[in-house]
Every structure is written in C-alpha cells, then in structure tokens.
Amino acid sequence: MTVKVDKKLDCLGLYCPEPVFRTRLALDEMEIGETLEVVADDPAAESDIYSLVKHLEQEIVSSAKEGSTIRILIKKIK
C-alpha cells in the first residue's frame, strides 16, 4: 500500500518533548485528509506520538522501526 505523504517531519536527534511538540504543530497546520510522515530516533517518541494522535483523534496509518529510528504516518481526519 502506497500512501501519499503531504508533509515530512524530521525529528532525528531531537529528544522529548520536541518530537511530539513538533508533530502537534505540524498537524495543526495541515488540512483534513493530509498525511504527515514523522521520523524520529528518541526512544520515547513512538509512545508519545501515539498518545498525541489518540488524544487529537487522528489516525495512525502505519509505523515502522528500523534500528533506533521510527517512521510514523499520521492521517489528519478531523
């Protein structure tokens, strides 16, 4: 399945709370239906971003880990 990414957010080298903060700002700027790709290597980023997405009632399209890097696709649905 190929997902069109509308915005990419590189959070490599950033640590809590920066990845989740930047993810929130990026989602706030996006239109409904757009997809955000977040790439981070902070060990807390995955759970923090998942919690944020749930709180904002958005949708995790996919997530994949490669070594210490996590790639999360988030669709803005509201």
Image: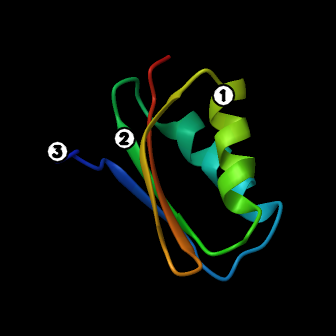
Q: Position of residue 50 (x, y in %)?
A: 65, 42
The answer to whether 51 is drawn above or below residue 63 in the figure is above
The answer to whether 43 is drawn above or below residue 58 in the figure is below
Residue 36 or residue 73, whichever sits in front: 73
What label sits on residue 1 in the rendered view? 3
Name the residue type under label 2.
Thr
Q: Residue at x 67, y 83 (%)?
A: 13
Q: Which of marks 2 and 1 is nearer the N terminus?
A: 2
| Cα–Cα gap, marks 3 and 2 | 14 Å
Q: Position of residue 31 (x, y in %)?
A: 41, 29
Q: Residue at x 44, y 21 (%)?
A: 77
Residue that numbered label 2 is attached to: 35
* Left or right relative to 29: residue 22: right
Name the residue type under label 3.
Met
Name the residue type under label 1.
Lys
Q: Which of marks 3 and 2 is nearer the N terminus?
A: 3
Residue that numbered label 1 is attached to: 54
Q: Position of residue 68 (x, y in %)?
A: 59, 79
- Mark 2 nearby-residue class (10 Å; few <14, some 14–19, many ≥20): many
| Cα–Cα gap, marks 2 and 1 | 15 Å
